[in-house]
Image: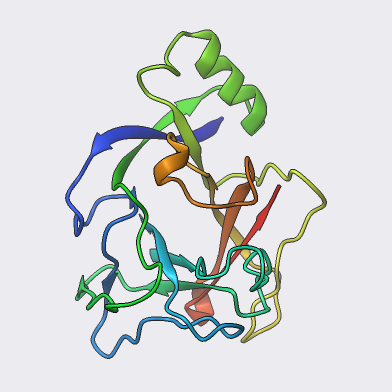
């Protein structure tokens, strides 16, 4: 069984539901992440509530391709695992590429196939892709475009748990930039309240 993330229409910028784009919901004391390479404010990509908390994903888009934003450790992206309660909309920096061009709600649909590619093909074959495109998967096993790059937790060094995979989006004008047709991968370590992100193409 594969849990697909399906586009579910537009949604409010600060909605607590699962979505890409908009404004991150954050705890008190949050500081907007800055790229380690260029120093600019990162772009907010996704708000992904789950059983272990809320995964919040950011990636630098100030100099696309120059800040090693594909790596989970080089400082061109940042992921957080926030508690589900006590979150409020963040103050968005006035400068930098900080937001996607659209906010897209994500609903989940379970498909019998175990493999993400096969599950997506089944969704397309059922004629549902045109109205409700697949935008990724939640949990299960990552579908790697290249080799397995599962990161280790920066706090405890254990192999992190796969949380979600994200497609770039349904419209290239408002999509994330994962190298052109790539996918982003989010991971968590719940005991350490850590998260990590990377992409492949």
Task: Give the camera-side residue of 65 and 198.
Answer: 65
- Relative placement, left or right, of 42 versus 182 is left
- Relative placement, left or right, of 182 versus 80 is right
Q: Is residue 52 visible?
A: no
Measuring from the top left, give residue 76's x and y in whole percent.
59, 74
Q: Which image quadrant is residue 33 in?
A: bottom left
Screen quadrant of the N terminus: top right
Measuring from the top left, give residue 154's x and y in whole percent.
64, 83
Task: Give the camera-side residue of 99 and 78.
Answer: 99
Residue at 58%, 24% (x, y): give it.
Answer: 119
Image vertical order of residue 60 relative to residue 139, above or below: below
Measuring from the top left, give residue 6's x and y in whole percent.
40, 33
- Relative placement, left or right, of 122 versus 169 is right
Residue at 45%, 8% (x, y): give it.
Answer: 127
Task: Give the camera-side residue of 76 and 40.
Answer: 40
| Residue that extends furthest to the top in the rendered view of this protein | 126
Q: Which image quadrant is residue 90 in?
A: bottom left
Image vertical order of residue 20 relative to residue 91, above or below: above
Task: Give the camera-side residue of 95 and 147.
Answer: 95
- Relative placement, left or right, of 88 versus 66 is left
| Residue that extends furthest to the right in the rendered view of this protein | 147
Image vertical order of residue 101 relative to residue 170, above or below: below
Q: Is residue 107 visible?
A: yes
| Residue that extends furthest to the bottom in the rendered view of this protein | 29
């Amino acid at each position: 069984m594969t849990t697909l993330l399906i586009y579910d229409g537009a949604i409010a910028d600060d909605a607590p539901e699962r979505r890409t784009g908009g404004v991150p919901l954050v705890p008190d004391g949050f500081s907007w992440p800055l790229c380690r390479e260029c120093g600019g404010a990162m772009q907010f990509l996704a708000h992904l509530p789950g059983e272990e908390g809320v995964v919040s994903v950011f990636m630098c888009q100030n100099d696309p391709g120059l800040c090693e934003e594909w790596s989970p450790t080089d400082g061109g992206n940042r992921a957080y695992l926030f508690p589900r309660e006590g979150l409020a909309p963040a103050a968005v920096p006035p400068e930098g590429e900080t937001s996607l061009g659209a906010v897209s709600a994500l609903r989940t649909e379970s498909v019998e196939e175990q493999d993400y590619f096969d599950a997506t093909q089944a969704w397309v074959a059922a004629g549902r892709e045109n109205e409700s495109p697949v935008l990724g998967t939640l949990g299960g096993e990552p579908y790697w475009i290249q080799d397995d790059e599962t990161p280790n937790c920066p706090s405890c060094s254990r192999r992190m748990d796969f949380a979600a995979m994200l497609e770039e989006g349904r419209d290239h004008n408002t999509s994330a930039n994962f190298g052109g047709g790539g996918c982003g991968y989010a991971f968590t370590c719940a005991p350490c309240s850590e998260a990590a992100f990377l992409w492949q193409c």
